[in-house]
Image (cartoon, helix red, strand yellow):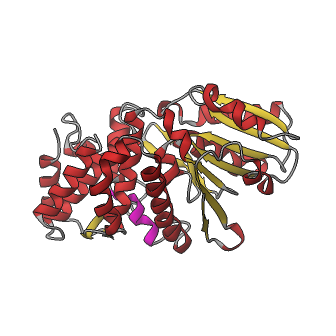
C-alpha cells in the first residue's frame, strides 16, 4: 500500500492506494468523528461492494442512500435525495458521508457534505479508474446544469481517499478507457516520463494488470496532489488540470450527459487542444501523432462529434468556468509534458482546429 498526502495545511488529508483496502477499517476509523455514517452509492455499485464496506463499519449508525447510476442524474434533483436521506435518519453535523462510487457519486456526495448543515465530513472511496486518478482528489464537488457541466458546486476537501485497485476488476472496459484519458492527461501536462511509460505499458493497463494500474493511479495522484497543494481553488496553476476539458465539457453538454463518458469527451478535447498547440508551433507533428496513437490504443475517441458545429462549441465554451472577464481561456501544450493557460488564442487557428478534429 502507498500513502500520499494532499498538503493543504489544516485541510491536509491522505490518499491510500493499494489492493484489498475496502474492508480495512483502520483506514477509515481515524477520520470518522462520531457514530453517524451515511454511505452514498449508486444502483450499480451497491450490489457489488456495499455490504463489504458496511461490515468494516462496525459500531456505527450506518445509513445508506442509493442513487441512480450515470452522468444524466448528476443534478440538483438527485442531490436532494442525499439531503432527504440525511434528514430522514436525523443525521447531525458530526455525521460523516462516505462516497462509494465513481466520479458522479463522489462529486455529489462531496457537494452534499459541503452543504448539509453548512458542512460535514466526507470520505472518498472511488470505484472507477477515472475517480481514483482525478475526481476523488482535490476537493472539486458539484452537479451539472442543462446549460453547463459542473457549474454548480464547491471546493470541499475529503478527510481521506481510499483507492482500492481491486475494485477495478469489475470495471467495464469502456469505463477503464475513460479513466485512462485522465492518466494520459497528466503525462501531457506535467509528467512526460509518465507519458513515455504509458506508451510502453498501455496494453498491460487495458488488460487490467493490477501492478500497472496501481502505478498509474499512484503517479496520477502524485501529480494532482502536487498541483492542488500549490493552488487549491484554481486561481493559477491548477487550471492546467483542465487540459482538454473546455472542449470536452462542450461535447458532454451538447451530446447529453452520459452519452459520451467524461473521459471520452476529454480524450477528444485533448486532441483538439493538441491540434491547436500544433498549429501554434508548440509541438511537432510526430508528437501530435504519438498523442493520437496512445489515445487510440486506449480505445478512446480522437474526433469530436460531426454534428457539433464551431458555433455550438463556442457558445458552450463561453459558459465554461475558465472564461474570465468575457475572454475564453484554453489550456494548451507549451511542449510535451508542460501545459500553459492562455487567453491569446488565434481565432483563425481555432477555426482550423474545429474543422480538422470533427469526425
Residue 198 in which image quadrant: bottom left
Say which quadrant the C terminus sits in.
top left
Q: Nearer the viewer, residue 334 or 352?
A: 334
Magenta stretch: dominant secondary structure: helix
Residue at the (20%, 64%) spot, across then down? 277
Q: Nearer the viewer, residue 249 or 37?
A: 37
- Please say whether residue 128 is visible from this viewpoint: yes
Residue at the (59%, 25%) spot, across then down? 43
In the image, is residue 78 part of the stretch drawn in magenta? no
Residue 314 relative to residue 325: left or right: left
Region in magenta: 237-243
| Residue 258 spot, x, y in % from top left | 42, 32
| Residue 26 spot, x, y in % from top left | 77, 53
Residue at the (33%, 68%) spot, across then down? 193
Say which quadrant the N terminus sits in.
bottom right
| Residue 87 spot, x, y in % from top left | 81, 35
Q: Nearer the viewer, residue 18 or 97?
A: 18
Residue at the (62%, 71%) spot, across then down? 7
Residue 104 relative to residue 347: left or right: right
| Residue 147 spot, x, y in % from top left | 42, 40
Query: Number of callouts in the render?
Result: 0
Residue 98 in which image quadrant: top right
Amino acid at each position: 500500500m502507498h500513502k500520499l498526502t494532499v498538503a493543504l495545511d489544516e485541510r491536509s488529508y491522505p490518499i491510500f492506494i493499494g489492493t484489498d483496502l475496502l474492508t480495512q477499517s483502520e483506514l477509515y476509523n481515524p477520520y470518522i468523528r462520531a457514530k453517524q455514517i451515511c454511505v452514498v452509492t449508486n444502483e450499480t455499485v451497491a450490489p457489488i461492494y456495499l455490504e463489504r464496506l458496511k461490515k468494516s463499519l462496525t459500531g456505527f449508525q450506518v445509513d445508506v442512500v442509493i442513487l441512480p447510476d450515470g452522468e444524466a442524474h448528476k443534478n440538483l434533483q438527485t442531490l436532494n435525495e442525499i439531503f432527504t436521506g440525511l434528514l430522514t435518519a436525523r443525521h447531525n453535523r458530526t455525521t460523516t458521508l462516505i462516497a462509494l462510487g465513481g466520479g458522479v457519486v463522489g462529486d455529489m456526495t462531496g457537494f452534499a457534505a459541503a452543504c448539509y448543515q453548512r458542512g460535514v465530513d466526507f470520505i472518498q472511496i472511488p470505484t472507477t479508474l477515472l475517480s481514483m486518478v482525478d475526481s476523488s482528489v482535490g476537493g472539486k464537488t458539484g452537479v451539472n446544469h442543462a446549460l453547463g457541466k459542473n457549474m454548480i458546486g464547491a471546493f470541499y476537501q475529503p478527510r481521506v481517499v481510499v483507492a482500492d485497485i481491486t475494485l477495478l476488476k469489475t470495471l467495464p472496459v469502456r469505463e477503464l478507457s475513460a479513466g485512462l484519458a485522465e492518466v494520459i492527461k497528466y503525462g501531457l501536462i506535467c509528467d512526460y516520463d509518465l507519458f513515455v511509460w504509458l506508451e510502453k505499458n498501455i496494453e498491460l493497463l487495458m488488460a487490467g494488470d493490477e501492478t500497472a494500474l496501481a502505478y498509474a493511479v499512484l503517479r496520477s495522484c502524485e501529480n494532482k496532489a502536487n498541483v492542488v497543494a500549490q493552488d487549491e481553488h484554481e486561481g493559477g496553476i491548477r487550471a492546467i488540470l483542465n487540459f482538454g476539458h473546455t472542449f470536452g465539457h462542450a461535447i458532454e453538454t451538447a451530446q447529453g450527459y452520459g452519452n459520451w463518458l467524461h473521459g471520452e469527451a476529454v480524450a477528444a478535447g485533448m486532441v483538439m487542444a493538441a491540434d491547436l498547440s500544433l498549429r501554434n508551433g508548440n509541438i511537432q507533428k510526430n508528437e501530435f501523432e504519438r498523442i493520437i496513437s496512445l489515445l487510440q490504443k486506449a480505445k478512446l475517441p480522437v474526433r469530436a462529434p460531426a454534428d457539433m458545429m464551431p458555433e455550438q462549441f463556442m457558445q458552450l465554451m463561453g459558459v465554461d468556468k475558465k472564461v474570465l472577464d468575457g475572454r475564453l481561456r484554453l489550456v494548451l501544450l507549451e511542449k510535451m509534458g508542460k501545459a500553459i493557460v492562455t487567453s491569446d488564442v488565434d481565432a483563425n487557428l481555432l477555426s482550423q482546429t474545429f474543422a480538422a478534429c470533427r469526425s
